Amino acid sequence: MFATTIKKAISMKRLLPVSCTAFAILLSAAAQAAAPGISGSTFNLTAAPAYLSQPDGLSVYSWGYGCTGGALPSGSTFVPTTTTTPFCTTMQVPGPTLVVTEGQSVTVTLTNNLPASAGNTSILFPGFTVSATGGVAGLLTQEAAPGATVSYTFTASSPGTRAYYSGTQGDLQVEMGLYGAIIVVPSSAPTNGTCPTHSTAAGLNTAGTALVNGGESDFRLSPTGAAYHLAQSCYDREYLFQFSEMDPNIHAQALAQVTGCAAPGAPTGCHLNVPTEPYHPVYFMINGRSMPDDMDTNYAAQYPHQPYNGNPHMHPGDLTLLRIIGQGRWQHPFHEHGNHVRILARDGNPILAPDGTSLAGPLLFTTTTTPGLAMDGIFYWTGKGLNWDAYGHHAGSSDPLATLTCTPDANGYNTGNALAVNYYEWCQDHNKPMEAKPFGDIGGGGPVTLPQPNLFTNGAWYGGSPYLGPDATVRSAGPTGSTPPSGTIANPPTSEAGFAFMWHSHNEREITTNNIFPGGMLMMMLVDSREFVIDESL
Amino acid sequence: MFSTRCWIALGLLSAFAVPAMAQSFRVQCPSSTITHPAAANNSEPAYSAPTYVPVTSGNADYTTGKSGPVNGAIKCQQISGGDGYAVMGDGTQTYLFSFGPLSGIGDITQGLPGTEFPSVFNTPFPVSTSNFLVPGDPATTVDGVGTSPIAGGLVGPLSTAQLARIAGSYNGAVGQDYDIGHTFSIFDISESGHTVTVVLNAQSPFVVGDQVVISQGSGTDLTGYIGTFAVTAVNIPNAFFPANFAFQYTNPTTGLAAVNMSSDAVASSAPAITGHVDPRQIMDVGVMNGNIPAPLMAIDEDDEFFLTLTNVGMIMRPDLFEQHTVHFHGYPNASAFYDGVPDASVAINIAASFTYYYLAPDAGTYFWHCHITPPEHLQMGMVGQLYVRPRQNRVTGALYAALQTQQRDLRTACRRPGDGAIPAVTTDPDILCSNPVPVVNTGAAGGGKTYAYNDGDGSTYYDVDYPVQMHGFDPNFHFVGMTFNPEGFADMKEKYFLLNGRSYPDTVNPDPLQTQSADGVYHFSQPLPTIIKIAPGQRALLRISNLNVSEYQTLASLGVPMQVVGYNAKLLRDQAGNNLYYTTNSITLGGGESLDVILDSCAVRSVLTDPSSSCTTPMPTGTYYLYTPNLDHLSNDAENFGGQMTEVRVAL
């Protein structure tokens, strides 16, 4: 079988309506993300070929790690446990995220099911002291010959996010997809403080004024609630982003040679000789998917070999842990709209001041992913300093949600009641109007006048008003909010009305899929009012 | 698309006055706001204390704890979104999708920000019978090219007379003009105590606070009512017409009888500056007048910033009917609405304007760009620079104590145990805060000095600052973009490598560069030279950003060391208060990154810990260079000498 090649060397400007229609079909629901993986101490992985899907229609011949036999071995579990319909096929890109606990002995047995002409393969676990058993000697580690196995054992010595990838002919095998992530969760709680209470309040109770306690499941991998032994690494949500790029010509040549070597009459010992330079990548992926595929759900059925997505959601004030790994050859400046990211650690090593507990990592609005480098960062959004009330509170309203109170804590946030819709509101802006004139059920007296909406083109992720959450949006702009020209409403005014932010590579050429914009390394991040239940099992 | 906002507006007509907003071009620059309530906010007051003091119990809102002085001012700017041409280092004219200046035009042609106080922004162009606006005015062009054209068709430097004309030019909002006053006949006027209720014969246009003149012609029945008054209330239920036909004012004279159906009674308002613009001026100036980089913006911490984007359309690409937006890149705690991402907010259609509103965030070097189809609009030139100056510039006296005082402001606080600020804290700093009190009190004092950040130790002091934006143009992409063809993204490859929109040797041309547009007129296209002039012993702050859309770029300094003090608009300081500055001779940035570098031309200072102290051993005077070690970027397309390079001139 040959790859289906549908290349569209045309600008997205002409394709936008087409693509938006495709969106509408693919966006089965508001997909959310978390950092799914498989947990255990013994992992049986297979390296095998399959085809990856790209949003321009190309199916790309690739190699990846998967679960031996296409199923999870006994003793392993899918995490987070609430994940819906997880699977572990014989091959996926990125490989299964291995979730282990600090101090644990980990054994990974690799079976080489790549085509014989691809030769040996192996796995490197940078950051761990690995002993390999079986296999044959390779340049960097013991390797598995075609059809054979090799085992790697190491102690998960310290917490953190790290990469694993092929240690055999990496220029080809990593390009083909042989990479993944390993997350070590800490075995004990932070030593310099305790984690704040993780609020799971979301949705509304029947009175419509307070949130449902326990309305959301806890999707964190770390049982201590922290990524490291540091109180500053406590988090409420976590997302893993693995960046890679792909040159389809290399994949096409690999497929052609694999096919040739397997054909009758091929010479004995026929093996691949695929040039990996000049390198001309045109697919730029996060977690093995290009936008918009990356915003579909984890384990979406249409991507049997690309199970992981990228579509973060968070409530105001949620401490959000970003686990970021550069798995390709290039650096990518990933720009997080909405706020800065505090880098906590590189390759599992916390970046600390000489006092041993103060953070010394940079605060970045653009996090550069670098080949082979993993980093962890914390992000959160509260709207502090907007200078207007993002919830559109309106003292004169009869809507109870419009007249909520704000009681500042020592940092100025409304944190006294985790069941309040405006939990983590910045109280200095509470009730502060943005619009000069009253509009709908929103008060006036503010600094700006919003022009006629007909002067604008609305976006698919525009919540329908300047305000956060369905109640404020409906009070401001009515229940239909806004309809973009595409007709796609990805952030409905009556149910979600979040603040959407684009997270994307700022080497902007990389937010294309081959020649099509939008695509590539791009995702939307949603800050959702606590009226909206973030369900990351989707 | 008939939006809900309209639907609601229709539904609520009887409840609220609907402002007269039919006009699609409009600027907004209030002289006062609820944040800056004084009548005028046209200067930066000294910083002595936070506006808000912490409130730790009970329900609070924006009025609670607001007991300190009002800090900062109001700043406004107007820009056009459209197209234009720029001239490359080899003389090639390159087509741009671009932003152009529509305020501060005189300042921008001199390399300054086009950001203005309301008093400047709201000054209409002084049109008279002898002072006309002609196409290209005010001063987006000068008459002809420079006096001494450089061989090869390059534009030469401007003559003294031309420069004088620019310097004397206009800085207000282009197009802003007096809106006509309203005159409405009065149906009924009556008084109850001091409160006068006026019922007009039509829906009242007045809002609370408007100055209204009550007058009549030859009649006398309104005696006692006549005069100029401030409207105190609107939407007054009355016996005659809908409530929105009526308003009230307060009259010192009481006891007047009601007057019904007076033959000549009118209520009128004076012509006023309200944000109304004359579209002719907008189009005359804004069309085909793009700049690269886009107009410079600079604000001070605590400012409110009103940025009006006016979409004048792309004349060369009418097929695209493109919207534009402004993304304030790197703003912490941005709002999705004002973030400029068209997918997540609104985008501005042609022939419309929209005002972005932000309170200035933490000090630092940010930048801005259009966010429509970023690989296209950024490659085509819609990138600009933006920085926020710190409160510390407005501090007199000890910087350390002033930063401790700033910790009382919860919006910018970065507290750690033992930082000496009041009240003492026991918890670790907030994970995203960036400006803790330094470990060492250097005793540095401010007062009329400039700093990159609120450092509290004077370590980011500078004498002069220069914005330096790295960019790159792919001439094929620009050509395809001009000729109605869909551009390919996969093969994008820059051939012109720019600092502030120019390649060497244009980077050291001190004048605004001009480009002849398709209309034959020379427009200012590249206002910013990149000549780093430093007096011996002084310090220059380089506010460096990279907006190249496909590559990482390195900038190196030959001779003068680069001290990196800020990164991504944040002071380089750990949360224990240690400075993490480092000295290097090169920095590397990806697209969408910024960094602050200080070039210090002093070898030894009189007070080692105070960079503002006098220099005892300056560096030798001379010309040094700032250039890219990406050596293939030292070219202008086919010319193998030029590109991303400029001069650092250490000279008196």
Image (spheres, coloured by chain):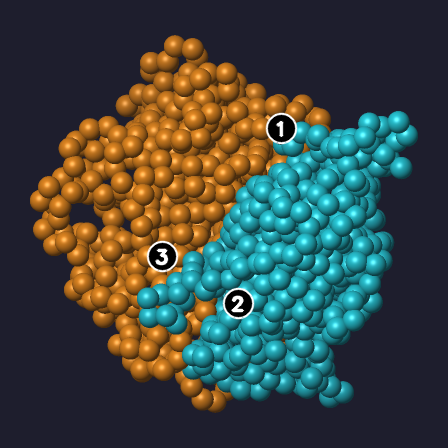
* Pointers 1 and 3 within a single chain: no
Query: Would you say residue B281 is visible in this rendering?
Result: no
**Chain at tag 2:** A
Report the residue marked by disc 1. A278
**Chain at tag 3:** B
Q: Amino acid at mark 2?
A: Ser
Give the distance between the C-alpha atoms of the residues marked 1 and 3, in whole angstroms: 38 Å
Kindly identify the residue that appears in the image at 40 percent across and 48 percent down: B595
Say left or right for B401 vs A285.
left
Give the distance between the C-alpha atoms of the residues marked 1 and 2, in whole angstroms: 39 Å
Q: Which chain is cyan?
A: A
Q: Amino acid at mark 3?
A: Leu
In front: label 1 or label 2: 2
In front: label 2 or label 3: 2
Residue B576 percent coordinates (x, y)? 33, 68
Q: Colour of chain B?
A: orange
Q: Amino acid at mark 1?
A: Pro
Report the number of discs.
3
Along the viewing direction, whichever of B135 and B104 lies nearer the viewer: B104
Mark 1 surroundings within 10 Å by alpha-carbon count, few (fewer than 14), some (14 through 19), many (20 or more): few
Along the viewing direction, whichever of B291 and B178 lies nearer the viewer: B291
Residue A403 percent coordinates (x, y)? 61, 82
Residue B104, compared with residue B365, is above or below; it is above
**Chain at tag 1:** A
Q: Report helix, strand or loop for mark 3.
A: loop
Say left or right for B443 vs A10.
left
Give the distance between the C-alpha atoms of the residues marked 2 and 3, in whole angstroms: 31 Å
Report the residue marked by disc 3. B572
Residue A174 percent coordinates (x, y)? 66, 44
Q: Which mark is residue A157?
A: 2
